[in-house]
Amino acid sequence: MLESVLGGVNLGIVVLDADRRVRLWNQWMARHSALRAEDVLGRDFFTIFPDLRNKRVDSAISQALRDNFPSLLSQTLNKSPFELFLDAPARERRMQQAVAVTPIAVGGGARHCLIQISDVSSAVGREKLLREQALVLRSQTFSDGLTGIANRRHFDVAMEKELRRAKRNSATLSLLMIDIDCFKTYNDHYGHQRGDDCLIRVASALAAMLQRPADLLARYGGEEFAVILPDSDAAQAMEMGEAMRATISELEIPHLQSVGEPHITVSIGIATQNLSAPVEVPVLIGAADRALYAAKRAGRNRVMAQDPL
């Protein structure tokens, strides 16, 4: 009965004596190592698995035999310690393993060591899939579905973080609010498909101008974009704003119904955190918005700045 049970359990069972010789090797071990019990019984364990010598498994066996101390190997640090395969004859797809090493007393009290090995490949695969799905979901949560840049939610989170950092480090922080001029007229004349294409081209051109990892371009809503520029003062922000305005104009996306240039242009409003009088996020956004509308009223296709009050 014991032999049938050991043959039927769905995990590897190995028993070593005090001299680390193999005394038990069940059918699961034979199946996944392609080594029959008769080929390993009585042999030194580390002649069968020489790569495990002086590794964590070796230490766990020593602790079990010498100190009567059980061990559960970390799956993070010991993903596949034993040379075991899901398809042992072909030696393909090395098995992900959970390993427990336990001291046991056999016969007249002679200490032995029980090694239990479980196949966790499926669980590891599921965890990997879940992590990948979580990353995709996070990406979707923080990315605009049309343009692929950061969305409003991402902007809100980043803005709070960067403003806190700027206050903590007494650093500058500038915000650009960018609006495509006469975009409703563009949509009405050319249709929503062309409107979407225009948004994608503008977003791509603006994103290509940001070189620093902390800089962020987000679709703020509709045809409006926002740019967070950490460690940028008013002069640097104005320089970037002018460069962005010129870049979009140079795309020469036709817009024959525009009240200004016969192609797509943008108006940009800028606000910069005043180091001597730091403000909160709504105040900074409000100042950039007012500067944007001032640029619109002044004739569009221009950059204007306003101090946050």
Image: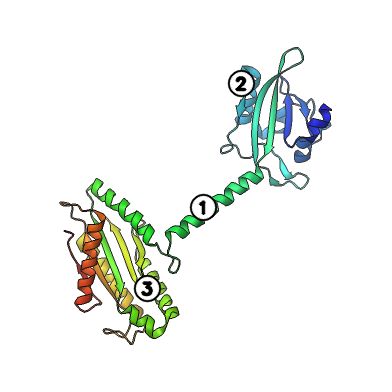
Mark number displayed over residue 122: none
**In this view, the mark in front (3 or 1):** 1
Q: What element carries label 1?
A: helix
Give the spatial CA distance, label 3 vs label 1.
Answer: 29 Å
Q: Name the residue under label 3.
A: 202
Q: Quadrant of the N terminus?
A: top right
Residue sitting nearer the eye, 77 or 217:
217
Q: What element carries label 2?
A: loop
Image x and y of residue 2, in percent = 81, 27
Image x and y of residue 272, in percent = 21, 59
Q: Name the residue under label 1.
A: 134
Q: Do the residues labelled 2 and 1 touch (CB within 8 Å)?
A: no
**In this view, the mark in front (2 or 1):** 1
Residue 264: quarter of image: bottom left
Residue sitting nearer the eye, 210 or 75:
75
Q: What crowding class fits label 1: few (fewer than 14 Cα within 10 Å), some (14-19), or many (20 or more)?
A: few
Residue 55: quarter of image: top right
The mark that comes first in sequence, 3 or 1, is 1
Give the spatial CA distance, label 2 vs label 3.
Answer: 65 Å
Which residue is pictured at 45% across the width and 66% down the height?
145
Residue sitting nearer the eye, 108 or 92:
108
The mark that comes first in sequence, 2 or 3, is 2
Mark number displayed over residue 69: 2
Image x and y of residue 101, in percent = 65, 27
Whether 90 is drawn above or below 148: the answer is: above
Mark 2 belongs to which amino acid?
Phe
Q: Is mark 3 on a helix, strand or loop?
A: helix
Q: Quadrant of the C terminus?
A: bottom left
Image x and y of residue 296, in percent = 23, 75
Q: What crowding class fits label 2: few (fewer than 14 Cα within 10 Å), some (14-19), or many (20 or more)?
A: some
Task: Decide if residue 184 is in sight here.
Answer: yes
The mark that comes first in sequence, 2 or 1, is 2
